[in-house]
Amino acid sequence: MSARAPRGPRGESPAMSWDPLRDLMSLKERMNRLFETVLRKGGDLAKGEAAGWNPAVNLTEDREGFRLSAELPGVPKDSIALSLENGILTLRGQRPLEKTRKADHLRVERSYGPFHRTFPLHAPIDQAKITARFHLGVLDVLLPKSPEARSAPIKVRIV
């Protein structure tokens, strides 16, 4: 009986030994390049396209209403749009690419381009009392609930 040479994962004779860790690292690098390419193009998620970036957002609720806080550094105030329709708050805007004077970029890690976020609100909002403030790159939006939505909880007796 003769000893056989070890076979590769698909049965072919390998030129070198199979290293699953090397294959996983290669796959990770290819996936990272794919995501970077797709995410930098921008677009509309409703149409199946990836957005340029998504700002970090906190959305909280208490008895009085909702509060949205969004980190928007580098976004001009006039490029931010807020709308409320059918109980859905929509935040849109765009962070422009910074212009440099004939400098070669050694690294570009900040995201630029359009963004679009939607937030369903499950209580009626008093639209006349909505306020928004943009200060030091942070957008704070207060969305008071309508008076009927803020009524005191009712204790229900269980029989």
Image: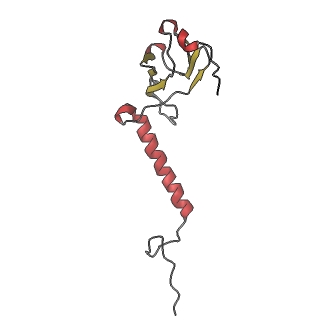
Residue ranking furthest to the bottom: 1
How many marks are shown on the rendered structure?
0
User: Residue most toward the left?
Assistant: 47
Tell me residue 58's x, y (percent). 58, 25
Near-viewer residue (156 or 26): 156
Compared with 26, 103 (above or below) is above
- Residue appearing at x 50%, y 34% in the figure: 108
> Is residue 90 depicted above or below 126 in this figure?
below
Q: Residue at x 36, y 37 (%)?
A: 48
Q: Residue at x 65, y 23 (%)?
A: 157
The residue closer to the viewer here, 125 or 22, is: 125
Location of residue 9 in the rendering, given as x and y in whole percent from the top left corner: 48, 70
Query: Nearest the camera: 91 or 143?
Result: 143
- The x and y percentages for residue 10 are 44, 71
The reply to whether residue 86 is visible in this rendering is: yes
Of 85 and 154, which appears nearest the observer? 154
Residue reaching furthest to the front: 159
Can residue 135 be seen from the camera position used here? no
**In the rendered view of the protein, which quadrant contains the C terminus?**
top right
- Res 137 quadrant in image: top right
Name the residue at 55% across, 22% down.
70
Q: How is the image coloured?
A: secondary structure
Horizontal relation, residue 116 to residue 158: left or right? left
